[in-house]
Amino acid sequence: MSSHQATAGHAPVDRTPVDPERRVSLAWEALASVDDPELPALSIVDLGLIRGVEPRPDGTLDIALSPTYVGCPATDVIRRDVERALENAGVGRFAVRQVLSPPWSSDWISAAGRRKLENYGIVPPERAASSMRDVLRTNRPVSCPRCQSPDTETLSEFGSTPCKALHRCRACLEPFEYFKCI
Amino acid sequence: MNELFRYVLRLGDLSLILGQRLGEWVGHAPALEEDLGLANIALDLVGQARLLLTYAGELEGRGRSEDDIAFLREHGEYLNAILAEQPNGDFGQSIVRQVLIDAFQLELYERMTSSTDERLAAFAAKSVKEVRYHLRYSGGWLVRLGDGTEESHARVQSALDRLWPYTVELFAEDDLDRLMADRGVAPRLSEVQAAWSARIDEILTAATLSRPKDRPHSWHGKRGQHSEHLGYILAEMQHLQRAYPGARW
């Protein structure tokens, strides 16, 4: 956990809005501008990583942030980017808290986020991660994002990042990435 | 000594040491896809270790960080079952070790999601999702190698015969395991073993491999008695922190 004083290191003019609602909306705006370092097409809000923005009784803005994968190296980068964005937005004192429970799910990617993934050439995850118990057995067909052919194969369960698997289309022969359902 | 602290170290060290072992494959795997696969699993395992060792440090209450605990302990203070520290061998042997531990973590974590310890319950709910993908990867490879060529079959069968005896330690319940189960912190190991065994049988059957017989064991990595292999792992893993104390990224 880390706390930050937005005015630290700047001129001693406190620009912090007093209205808590205004601070919360400023924070959400700032967070929506933070891109995922590995998926620059998506913001961390699109990915559903921000679990809450709430003022505490002592005036600190509590930012609840979920990691996608526990070992994802982007987690530390995201945290730094979040802190920088909030400082720049002048939301006042805040603290970023890591939230593990409930665990982040690919179901939390917003509709806008799914569209952005698709436009970026990454097949969005299948919905209903609760059906993930079958992950050990079933290999559901994933359609090619370029030619839409369902005739595709899995090359590797682990792609360039922990959250993506590598597939290939047998029809157009292009490899593509699939955002794993978790 | 705080019992929960020791139990959390057991869990954390299993992930830490296996993650470090898998890391040795980076740049050496048989194909780029496997290099990425093994490295990604290693990352998840090190991520698990970070959460657990951070928690262990808090339980201990002496102000030690995850890094202090990971890098500045002595040989006998690591509490991983010694299956995790067994050498990589060939790709097949690493896959066999991975299947055995992935299936163990899967069955353990699934049951730990209802732990009376909130931190462990949250940890387990998060990590079990990742472990399912680990087993999907390792299990898939074991089936392909076992049910592959004569050569690949012979190699993974021999790796299975070599590593199987170490699995006994995973399920050998001692006072600490019993205490954790009594408190509802962890599931009974006998229950985990039954589920593990069924899952392993299913994979071995698909892989046309025969299951070795259980034998009594005398290994106690969970109590800090390790094979000589751990020393080499620690020499590499701890080198930077020992040579440059307090170095940070």
Image (cartoon, grey):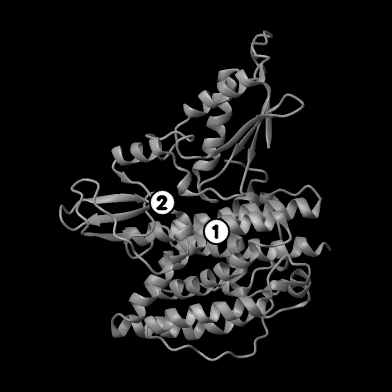
**Relative horizontal placement of residue B238, taking residue B44 as reference (left or right):** right
Based on the displayed image, in which of its 4 quarters is residue B8 positioned?
bottom right
- Image x and y of residue B126, in percent: 57, 55
Q: Quadrant of residue B46?
A: bottom right
In whole angstroms, how far apart are the C-alphas of marks 1 and 2? 26 Å
Residue B129: percent from left, percent from top: 51, 58
**SS class of the residue under badge 2?**
loop
Question: Along the line of sight, which residue is nearer the eye, B238 or A71?
Answer: A71
**Up-down: is B173 above or below B114?**
below
Q: Quadrant of the C terminus of chain B?
A: top right
> Who's the residue at 64% across and 78% down the image?
B191
Q: Chain of mark 1?
A: B
Residue drawn at point x = 64 percent, y = 50 percent: B241
Residue B72 is situated, as x and y percent measured from the top left of the image, at 70, 55
- Residue underneath mark 1: B45
Q: Quadrant of residue B26?
A: bottom left
Count how many numbered circles sit on residues in the image.
2
Looking at the image, residue B168 lies above or below residue B239 = below
Q: Residues within 10 Å of mark 2 (few under 14, many from 20)?
A: some
Q: 10 Å neighbourhood of mark 1: few (<14), some, or many (≥20)?
A: many
Of A7 and A58, which appears nearest the observer?
A: A58
Q: Is residue B84 visible?
A: yes
The reply to whether residue B24 is visible in this rendering is: no
Q: Are marks 1 and 2 on the same chain?
A: no
In the displayed structure, B235 sits above or below B210; it is above
Residue that lies at the very extreme toward the right in this rendered image: B1
Disc 1 marks a residue whose amino acid type is Leu
Identified by mark 2, the residue type is Arg
* Residue carrying label 2: A127
Q: Helix or strand or loop: what does disc 1 sit on?
A: helix
Q: Which residue appears at 68% of the width and 85% of the height? A: B218
Q: Chain of mark 2?
A: A
